[in-house]
Amino acid sequence: MSEEMKALREQLLRNDKNGYDTLDEAQLAEMEAYCTDYKAFLNAGKTERLSARAAIAAAEAKGFVQYKRGMALKAGDKVYTCNRSKGLMLAVIGKESLAEGAQIAAAHIDSPRLDLKPTPLYEDSEMAYFKTHYYGGIRKYQWVTIPLQLRGVVAKKDGSVVDVCIGEAGEPQLVITDLLPHLGQEQSKKPLAEGIVGEQLNLLLGSKHQKIEHAVLLVRNIAVGAALVLFIASLLHAPMEALLKGIAYFFGAAAYFCEIVLLTDCFTAKVPHKELFMAYCFGPMYILLGLSYLLGH
């Protein structure tokens, strides 16, 4: 290719470059430092109060002082005032009169979140929950089955305020539960905005299993183990094959019955029948198979 053609190609064709390729080492270091500081601010400012607190610390490091009503100000002074611990105004006093105008830059401290309702605590199926209502334009399906923190303040009767922070590394964390895939077939058919609704965004705090649940779980596991052993034994003892398989199928039916008890929380929870269809079918089917083997024996 001639030099003239190369020059034309440079002029006529695009040669896009990644932004990183246009920066030198000093600019890259400056960019990384800025991004690191910004990420640290986002991590520190999980709520409006925390964002304002972090911004005040950054402002004071740059020479800003808290404004007091009536204090004398002169050109070049840097002052700030905080409104109810959630709004912040910073000002650099200029040389000209306000009649000449002012330069104003505004930013919105926002924190999409789930707020606790006034009386949030309730119990359902031996589990404790907090009722919530969402604030901001959240995408509700993003908030389930992920670790969550409890952040805020508690105002005491004496007027003092106590910060609350539960869920940092090494601490208990909260979660909003969701259906298991094999129980959420109907949910999967819904539009994205309807799969998880606001009324479902309740925080699971803890649970305490009843003794009967442990007993049913133990019986189910024993039944499954016994069925497995009997099926293996039927392969090794041909003369007793029908008897062993018949008894094994009865143990299998018992295991499916225990599964229904567990899924319905001892028949107290309403579970769609279609979600229990397999257990409904295989339980009686195993009984019939067991009877056929025993009668044949």
Image: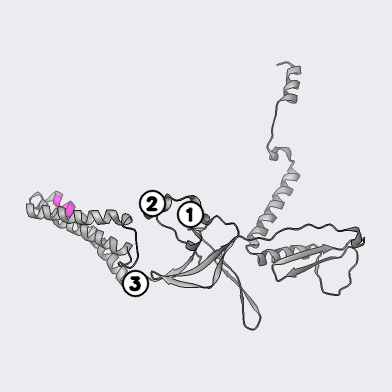
As for residue 136 lying within the magenta part, the answer is no
Residue 117 drawn at (x, y percent): 54, 70
In this figure, which residue is indicated by the disc labeled 2? Answer: 185
Task: For the N terminus, give its image quadrant.
Answer: top right
Q: How far apart are marks 2 and 1 (CA)?
A: 14 Å
Q: Left or right of 189: which side holds 240?
A: left
Three-letter amino acid code at the position of disc 3: Gln
Provide the residue span drawn in magenta.
Answer: 229-234
N-terminal-most mark, 2 or 3: 2
Tag nearer the camera, 1 or 3 = 1
- The residue at 36%/53% (across/down) is 182
The answer to which quarter of the image holds residue 286 is bottom left
Q: Left or right of 140: which side holds 41?
A: right
Q: In this view, does 275 lie above or below 205?
A: above
In this figure, which residue is indicated by the disc labeled 1? Answer: 194
As for residue 231 lying within the magenta part, the answer is yes
Q: Is the magenta stretch mostly helix, strand or loop?
A: helix
The answer to which quarter of the image holds residue 19 is top right
Residue 287 drawn at (x, y percent): 17, 56
Q: Distance between the residues labelled 2 and 3?
A: 28 Å
Residue at the bottom extreme of this rendering: 158
- The residue at 66%/81% (across/down) is 159
Element on which disc 1 rests: helix
